[in-house]
Image (cartoon, rainbow, N blue to C red):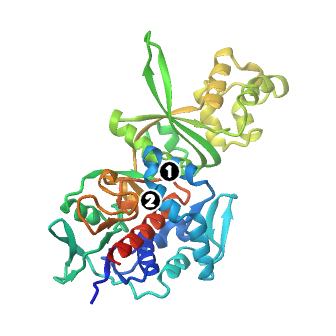
Amino acid sequence: MEKPIIIIGSGPAGLAARTGAGEMGKKAVILEKADRPSLKLLASGGTKCNFSNMLSKEDFMARFGRKGSFMRNALTLTFREWVSDFLSVHGIKTVLTDDFYCFPASGGAKAVRDAFCEGFDKVETFAEVTEILTENGQAAGVLLKDGRKIESNKVILAAGTSAWASLGSKKGLLLAEKCGHTIVDILPAVAPLHIKEEWVKSLAGVSLEKAEILLYEEKSSAGGKKKVKEIWKTRGNLLFTHEGLSGFSALDMAEEAGKMCLKNTSATILLKVFPERSREETAMLPALYRKEYGNKLVRSLLAEREKLPRSLAENIARLAECEEMTGCRLTAESEKNLISLLCDGIPLTVEKTGPMEKAMAASGGVSLKEIDPATMESKLIKGLYFAGEIMDLVGPCGGYNIQWAISSGRLAGRSAAMDQK
């Protein structure tokens, strides 16, 4: 009797792996250590489950940085269209938010989970794997915490990372490490930014519908001149918190800012509050204030005319040293400061990202150098495959990571079943 493929983890990667194996006519069983399956998936996107977006395959990979090309085979097999069609077959319509983000029209994450579970045996819960068994460099099965031994020459490790402390775990990484795999340092990604400047924390609860954050690094060029190198730029909603910044634009910045903090102990970002205005239009504001609103305080004009939250407007005026100045009394120095803050951005210092308990995803994981991108199979252990977040590849907010989990999971499942067949 043929042994079933063993899948460790019931997130989107594990569910898609079982689907991929089923398409090839092979049985797969999912082992989940928690008391319920797919807990992280059910919580994704505030339970709404942003499963993909409208980027082209090339642009999608680019958002994962220089390692993004590793995804090519998986995305070629399974991309946005496949997921939408799959959900449609299961009676789930999909919708776009902001003409970009893909969501299930109703039912949210639970509907997505149920679609992937339809037609399969129930996920086995309270089934914690403590060891992946190997023989002569070949997967041989798993050992469970309750003492059971399940034999199989095909094992798919889709257990995720330690992001979201109440939902994630590092145990999958430990299993991979025991098999000889290299684990790249785990850092919070898609996480809040801790900001040094106290005035930012005093704005807790204030939000901007659209803001741009630029991460940069100053480097000395020939002749001793400072040259600014742009590392990462992101745009979206922003939320001020008692620790710093959250919201889409901050969460999207977390991975790169975290790496910079690890390298230099801190990172410098520029916050632009008018990202959709041209520099020319914004730079004209002081002159406009002087001419048409001479008797009004600059901080009031920033709040009332420019529609900035009042507390933020007051802090920008304070940073520009024009907090008590009216439009007609702006000094040359304050005007220069104000234009710089509004056009170039407000400089802020990121002290750290996270913590891991608040991170929705983590960077780091099993080294991609030890995984075959064409099949997701380990280059060290034959018959061992990887899927999803457990690998050293993470994207920003916006459907990237769930799409990658589904794509890599389906490829791993089909590859394991095809090889077995």
State the image quarter where residue 143 is shown: bottom left
- Residue placed most toward the observer, 259 or 80: 80
- Residue placed most toward the observer, 118 or 333: 118
Q: Position of residue 83 (x, y in %)?
A: 56, 70
- Please state, as top left, top right, bottom left or bottom right, where the C terminus lies in the image: bottom left
Is 384 on the left or on the right of 27, as rendered?
Answer: left
Residue occupied by mark 1: 251
- For numbered disc 1, what is the local secondary structure? helix
Q: Position of residue 269 (x, y in %)?
A: 50, 35
- Residue placed most toward the observer, 332 or 152: 152
Kindly report the distance in space between the C-alpha atoms of the residues bearing marks 2 and 1.
9 Å
Amino acid of disc 1: Leu
Q: Position of residue 400 (x, y in %)?
A: 52, 58
Marks 2 and 1: CB-CB under 8 Å? yes
Q: Nearer the N terminus, badge 2 or badge 1?
A: 1
Residue occupied by mark 2: 360
Q: Is residue 18 above or below residue 198?
A: below
- Residue placed most toward the observer, 107 or 96: 96
